[in-house]
């Protein structure tokens, strides 16, 4: 049953150049009820993302990163604490805060084009804004696959469609849950640069979950390192490097060693 | 043709093989039909059947067609594929008709009148077409009305139960309690409660269709992954969009399973209703024929029913293939 979770704030017409959202997570704890017990997942997490900032979240698998993103998206409410967007409590999903989930989850009955146009259709602005669909598809390099069905795509292509489906909405906050996880390493590097330049152009606030320390350092202004479950903020590292960044930089290497240290992996360096 | 022969020697061997193979089974099938036609014409019927000559001519026509197709096949790739594929079945049918003809009309091996010869059934179609045609029309109309009502009602009910907790609360126990009862069990009461036997039958057919459609639609809606809703909601979908553009399309494969099951049970109810109460339709024709002990008419009605049910199945499969063309590997009918 889904009736309980159907509130959605009314969607305004999306501006071309989104004015970025300031995100503030204050003392958030979250737990799940498993049969017979409670599973604490987030433990007093506080962090802020200034409007237009690019924040990366790093942490061990299963520590609660995706859970935190669901709270930010407004899909779930935290057990304790509050999640604020521009100072207002986030209580329901809104198309200005778009999530690219870990799993691409395309609708198998819709073509790639109709998957990407989903947000515009849901907001009732598709007929005016059709051009944006093609632009988003070209951006992820899938312009030629507009008429394909999801089962005809590779895993990486599906993930790029999911990215296009998010970008087409010109979000004020873009939440990315390991969006490049299934891409081959070449496409991955290319998409990292694309995303950074897109972020610089469109100016949205970005929240990126990744397992890849280099990816976090290459893209983000700040890297937040989480502890094991229940997740707490273990470190908050500012990446004081201008874009475009170079992986061979001295400072890049220092930061990587620092972060691996926070993850308890300094021995691998 | 010349360039085929002029080509590589392998090609030539292929060609010879194809020629031999194709003509063999195809021509055998043609001979079987020709034999059936010959038996019909040469020997006298043991009974009094009026259309033996016409029937024999049709068998001869089929034989000629098969022969022509088999002979021409090697020169036409598309035809060759068809002939190769169908020749074994054609042969079996030809032998069947020949055997049927011999064991019934000619040598009376199978007891008459319980096993009428093919020309007797053919005769029903030519000489009793007015009544048979009217019965077909009545059955088709009755079934179409009942099935359409049942399918639409079942679909709407299934969606409501799957979507709304309140509807589910009230409908679920009723559905669990009443649903599994075969619709035919309601028949005596329905004939008594409804003003006409026709409206009672429409109700029963609709009931038989609605139950599986409801349950499968409901389970389809319930099985929609919650991630589908999460995606749409973060992109600004309202609940109307979630029902119409997410839940229903995602549930459609289940809905079609329900529609198929409903089609099967609606056939059963249709026939029973027509056998027991309605004064029209194929079931009634069957009943009427039994009253006169005219077995040929009964077989003819059964044949028509078979063709109708199978056609409706095919139509539903076609519809599903169109609507669910996005699915890979759907079952072919
Ligand atoms: N709906 C739920 N019900 C119960 N437990 C859940 C639910 N969602 C997540 N969990 C649990 O919460 C913990 C954190 O899950 P989460 O998906 O947030 O991890 P993650 O940090 O994103 O991991 P990964 O990097 O592997 O994706 C896991 O132990 C998981 O089993
Ligand atoms: Mg995760």
Image: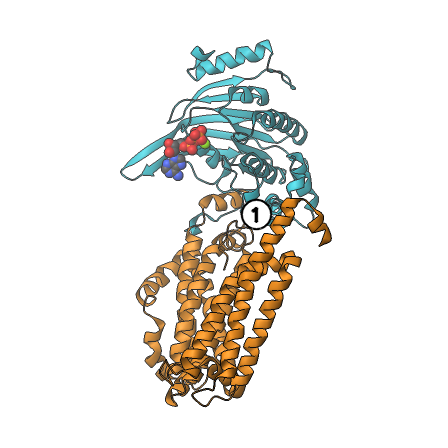
Q: Is residue B144 above or below residue B275?
A: above
- Chain designation of label 1: A
Task: Output the letter for the chain in cyan.
Answer: A
SS at circle 1: loop
Q: Is residue A31 visible?
A: yes
Specify the colour of chain B: orange
Q: Position of residue A3 (x, y in %)?
A: 44, 52
Asked if the beta carbon under badge 1 is closer than 8 A to the nearest atom of ligand 1, the reply is no
Q: Nearer the viewer, residue B333 or B11?
A: B11
Left or right relative to A201: residue A83: left
Compared across the picture, whether B265 is left or right of A167 comes to left
Q: Quadrant of residue A151?
A: top right
Closest to the observer, A25 or A138: A138
Vertical relation: A268 (above or below) A108: above
Looking at the image, the residue that sits furthest to the top is A250
* Left or right, B139 with reference to A150: left
The answer to whether residue A79 shows anywhere in this view is no
Could you tell me residue A246's position as x and y percent? 62, 16
Look at mark 1 in the image and give the residue it sits on. A10
């Amino acid at each position: 049953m889904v009736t309980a979770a159907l509130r959605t704030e009314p969607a305004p017409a999306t501006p071309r150049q989104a004015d970025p959202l300031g995100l503030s997570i204050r003392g958030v704890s979250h737990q799940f009820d498993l049969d017979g017990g409670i599973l604490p997942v987030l433990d007093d997490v506080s962090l802020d993302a200034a409007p237009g900032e690019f924040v990366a979240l790093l942490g061990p698998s299963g520590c609660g990163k995706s859970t935190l993103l669901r709270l930010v998206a407004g899909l779930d409410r935290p057990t304790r604490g509050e999640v604020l967007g521009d100072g207002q409590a986030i209580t329901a999903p809104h198309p200005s805060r778009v999530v690219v989930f870990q799993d691409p989850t395309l609708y198998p009955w819709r073509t790639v084009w109709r998957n990407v146009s989903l947000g515009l259709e849901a907001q009732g602005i598709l007929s005016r804004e059709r051009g944006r669909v093609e632009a988003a598809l070209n951006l992820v390099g899938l312009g030629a696959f507009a008429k394909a069905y999801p089962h005809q795509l590779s895993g990486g292509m599906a993930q790029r469609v999911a990215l296009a489906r998010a970008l087409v909405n010109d979000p004020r906050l873009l939440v990315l849950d390991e969006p490049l996880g299934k891409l081959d390493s070449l496409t991955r590097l290319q998409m990292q640069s694309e995303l950074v330049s897109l972020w610089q152009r469109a100016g949205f606030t970005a929240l990126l979950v990744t397992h890849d320390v280099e990816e976090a350092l290459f893209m983000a202004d700040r890297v937040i390192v989480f502890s094991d479950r229940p997740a707490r903020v273990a470190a908050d590292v500012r990446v004081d490097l201008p874009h475009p960044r170079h992986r061979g930089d001295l400072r890049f290497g220092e930061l990587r060693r620092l972060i691996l240290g926070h993850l308890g992996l300094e021995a691998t360096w | 043709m010349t360039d085929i022969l002029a080509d590589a020697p392998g090609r030539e061997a292929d060609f010879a093989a194809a020629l031999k193979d194709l003509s063999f089974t195809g021509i055998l099938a043609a001979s079987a039909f020709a034999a059936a036609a010959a038996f019909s014409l040469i020997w006298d019927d043991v009974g009094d059947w009026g259309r033996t000559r016409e029937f024999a001519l049709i068998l001869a026509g089929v034989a000629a067609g098969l022969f022509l197709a088999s002979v021409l096949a090697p020169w036409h790739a598309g035809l060759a594929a068809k002939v190769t594929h169908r020749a074994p079945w054609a042969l079996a049918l030809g032998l069947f008709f020949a055997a049927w003809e011999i064991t019934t009309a000619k040598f009376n091996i199978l007891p008459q009148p319980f096993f009428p010869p093919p020309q007797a059934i053919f005769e029903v179609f030519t000489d009793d077409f007015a009544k048979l045609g009217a019965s077909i029309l009545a059955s088709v109309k009755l079934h179409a009305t009942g099935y359409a009502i049942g399918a639409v009602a079942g679909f709407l009910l299934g969606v409501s139960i799957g979507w709304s907790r309140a509807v589910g609360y009230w409908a679920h126990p009723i559905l669990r309690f009443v649903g599994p009862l075969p619709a035919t069990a309601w028949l005596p009461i329905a004939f008594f409660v409804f003003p006409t036997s026709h409206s009672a039958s429409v109700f029963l057919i609709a009931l038989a269709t609605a139950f599986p459609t409801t349950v499968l639609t409901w389970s389809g809606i319930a099985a929609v992954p919650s991630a589908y809703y999460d995606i749409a909601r973060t992109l600004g979908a309202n609940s109307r969009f979630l029902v119409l553009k997410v839940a229903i399309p995602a549930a459609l494969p289940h809905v079609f399973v329900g529609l198929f099951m409903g089609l099967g049970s609606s056939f059963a109810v249709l026939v029973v209703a027509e056998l027991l109460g309605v004064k029209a339709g194929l079931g009634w024709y069957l009943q009427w024929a039994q009253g006169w002990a005219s077995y040929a008419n009964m077989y003819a009605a059964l044949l028509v029913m078979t063709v109708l049910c199978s056609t409706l199945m095919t139509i539903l499969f076609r519809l599903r293939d169109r609507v669910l063309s996005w699915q890979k590997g759907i079952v072919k009918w």
